[in-house]
Image: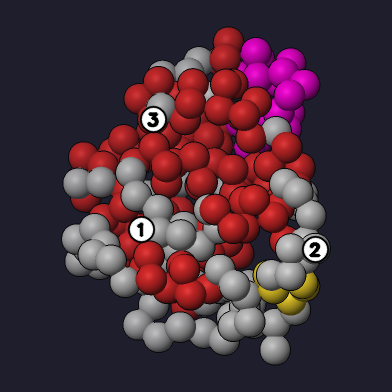
Amino acid sequence: MSFVITGDDGLTRCGWAGVEPETSYHDEEWGFPLDGDGAFFERVALEGFQSGLSWRTILTKRENFRAAFAGFDIEQVARFTDADVTRLLGDAGIIRHRGKIEAVINNAQRAAELIEREGSLPAYFWRYEPESAPEPQSQTTSPESIALSKDLKKRGWKFVGPTTMFALMQASGIVNDHAVECVIRSRVAEARAAPRPARTPR
């Protein structure tokens, strides 16, 4: 059974969502189906920055990340130069990790290539939706996240390991990993039942 917590409002949620800003993120975003190239690019970037850190750290700096990376506009970030890397390394509002900063710029360039070849990022990422759902919050990787990571790395993406990609799949609704007892799980299931972007074949 997944760990859950009952809040002051009497609602049962996933155990990690007991306080703000995690509660609002959990209730309003986590697990709801994601669409749009920019939205997927932002999530990949933020999940990469989160590697080795707490998600709270990322949430509290999220608006700073958006400002620093041009709203995660793929075309703009793809044109960032060494001068931008230097600027970002001096920005105390974000995670000042050279490898992760350079990975976001690299991944913007790779995302532009992928969109040209596959049509859109949603069409690409949603093709890794599993045929059957695992027990909620029972794993940190999956066969699909391993395959996604392998394919992205082959395409030149960075900071896209299997665990990071599974976190992306949880966050973007590709899997519904809310606890069975969580009040948000049924809302996510309903949202996921809506038509999804057309998948491109693997």
Residue 58 quadrant:
top right
The answer to whether residue 139 is visible is: no
Q: Label 3 sits on what residue type?
A: Ile
Q: Nearer the viewer, mark 2 or mark 1?
A: 2
Visual colour scheme: secondary structure
Residue receiving disc 1: 125
Instruction: From this view, report whether residue 50 is shown above or below residue 130.
Output: above
Residue receiving disc 3: 74
Badge 1, how many Cα within 10 Å: few under 14, some, many 20+? many
Q: Nearer the viewer, mark 3 or mark 2?
A: 2
Q: CA distance from mark 3 to mark 2?
A: 40 Å
Q: Position of residue 113 (x, y in %)?
A: 29, 38
Badge 3, how many Cα within 10 Å: few under 14, some, many 20+? many
Say whether disc 1 or disc 3 marks the residue closer to the N-terminus: 3
The answer to whether residue 49 is visible is: yes
Say whether disc 3 or disc 2 marks the residue closer to the N-terminus: 2
Badge 2, how many Cα within 10 Å: few under 14, some, many 20+? few
Instruction: From this view, report whether residue 164 is shown above or below residue 78.
Output: below
Q: Identify the element where label 3 is drawn.
A: helix
Q: Which mark is residue 8?
A: 2
Instruction: From this view, report whether residue 33 is shown above or below residue 147.
Output: above
Q: CA distance from mark 1 to mark 3?
A: 16 Å
In the picture, measured across the screen, residue 103 lies left or right of residue 88, that is left
